[in-house]
Image (cartoon, helix red, strand yellow):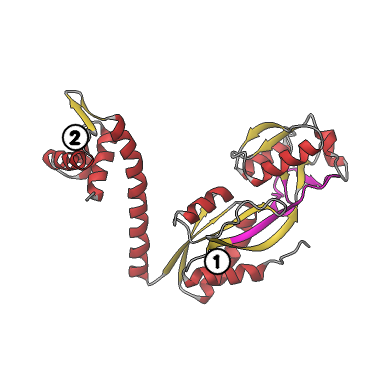
């Protein structure tokens, strides 16, 4: 059976390039390091480490294993933190994923109300919706806030339960001193030569909505830059370097930007609370109830 310490030894050898330095880092003797490596190699029946006068380095198969080992060790460390926190402090700990804009406005209020009702520690993980869903399905999160398109829902799967909290129309984010800001409503056809700021993942909702709408208008959008950093997106738009899709609630008023609707209509961005359909900690159910109470389910 594999032991966590065997995996830690493999990672240390990769990081330090020798058995001696790995032993010093882990506080072991070199024979102990060699023993753990030998046990790993016997288990897999392959050579994982090559040793010579210059030190030690992983074989190709060793490199494959060490990548998986780091993920396993990270999960073990996370589990240990959760258990010891609850043991020492008597707290329930839940991990919640969220995207930046609405998540940063809504989730803190929800956590404050939750902590007024029960002893709970909430770890918040900022991530795009696709990553939140993947971490939920992997058991790394208990719940999350995500967004998708009301017209093209992307995350409806039997293992997840989604509750819609808010629906807002997509708009075009433009510089407030630019040509487009002077128009009450934009025609996408007039933006055929414009540059756009897109998400890092081309399959994220905003990119899919943008491609669909622009193609209906007869062109493919030209993507100037891809980023998931909301500040970077606002900064680029404020400098007149491109446009982006956004909702009014997601606008950061510190930047010189405004949003404008389009003649064609871009559909609705739907913000949802998502959790596993299976049993979850009581704190997740309570957070769910609180968030539903904080926002209307239909646009203002």
Q: Nearer the viewer, residue 235 or 48?
A: 48
Residue with the most extreme bottom position: 117
Q: Which residue does the image show at 55% across and 60% down from the upper left? A: 158
Residue range in magenta is 246-273
Q: What residue is disc 2 on?
A: 19
On screen, residue 116 above or below 264: below
Q: Taking 226 as reference, is 131 left or right?
A: left
Tell me if mark 2 has few (under 14), some (14-19) or many (20+) residues whose alpha carbon lies within 10 angstroms of its own: many
Residue found at the far top of this picture = 53
Label 2: element kind: helix
Q: SS for tag 1?
A: helix
Residue 264 falls left or right of residue 247: right
Q: x and y percent of residue 14 in the render? A: 28, 34
Q: Are marks 1 and 2 in contact (CB under 8 Å)?
A: no
The first of marks 1 and 2 along the sequence is 2
- At x 79%, y 29%, the residue is 193
Front-most of 107 and 131? 131
- Position of residue 161 measured from the top left corner of the image (x, y, whole percent): 57, 63
Residue 174 visible within the image: yes
């Amino acid at each position: 059976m594999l032991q966590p310490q065997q995996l830690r030894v493999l990672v240390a050898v990769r990081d330090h390039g020798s058995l001696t330095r790995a032993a010093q880092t882990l506080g072991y003797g070199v024979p102990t390091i060699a023993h753990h490596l030998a046990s790993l190699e016997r288990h897999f029946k392959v050579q994982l480490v090559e040793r010579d006068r210059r030190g030690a380095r992983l074989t190709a198969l060793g490199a494959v294993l060490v990548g998986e080992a780091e993920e396993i060790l990270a999960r073990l460390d996370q589990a240990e933190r959760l258990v010891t926190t609850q043991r020492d402090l008597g707290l329930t700990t839940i991990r919640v994923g969220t995207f930046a804009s609405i998540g940063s406005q809504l989730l803190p209020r929800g956590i404050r109300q939750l902590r007024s009702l029960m002893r709970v520690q909430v770890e918040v993980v900022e991530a795009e919706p696709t990553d939140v869903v993947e971490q939920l399905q992997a058991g790394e999160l208990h719940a999350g806030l995500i967004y998708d398109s009301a017209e093209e829902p992307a995350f409806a799967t039997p293992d997840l339960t989604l509750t819609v909290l808010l629906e807002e129309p997509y708009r075009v984010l433009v510089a407030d001193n630019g040509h487009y800001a002077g128009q009450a409503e934009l025609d996408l056809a007039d933006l055929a030569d414009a540059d756009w700021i897109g998400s890092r993942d081309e399959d994220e909702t905003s990119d899919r909505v943008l491609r669909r709408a622009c193609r209906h208008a007869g062109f493919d959008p030209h993507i100037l830059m891809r980023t998931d950093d909301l500040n970077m997106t606002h900064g680029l738009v404020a400098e007149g370097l491109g446009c982006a899709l956004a909702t009014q609630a997601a606008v950061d008023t510190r930047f010189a930007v405004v949003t404008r609707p389009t003649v064609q209509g871009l559909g609705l961005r739907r913000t949802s609370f998502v959790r596993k359909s299976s049993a979850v900690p009581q704190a997740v159910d309570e957070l769910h109830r609180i968030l539903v109470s904080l926002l209307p389910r239909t646009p203002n």
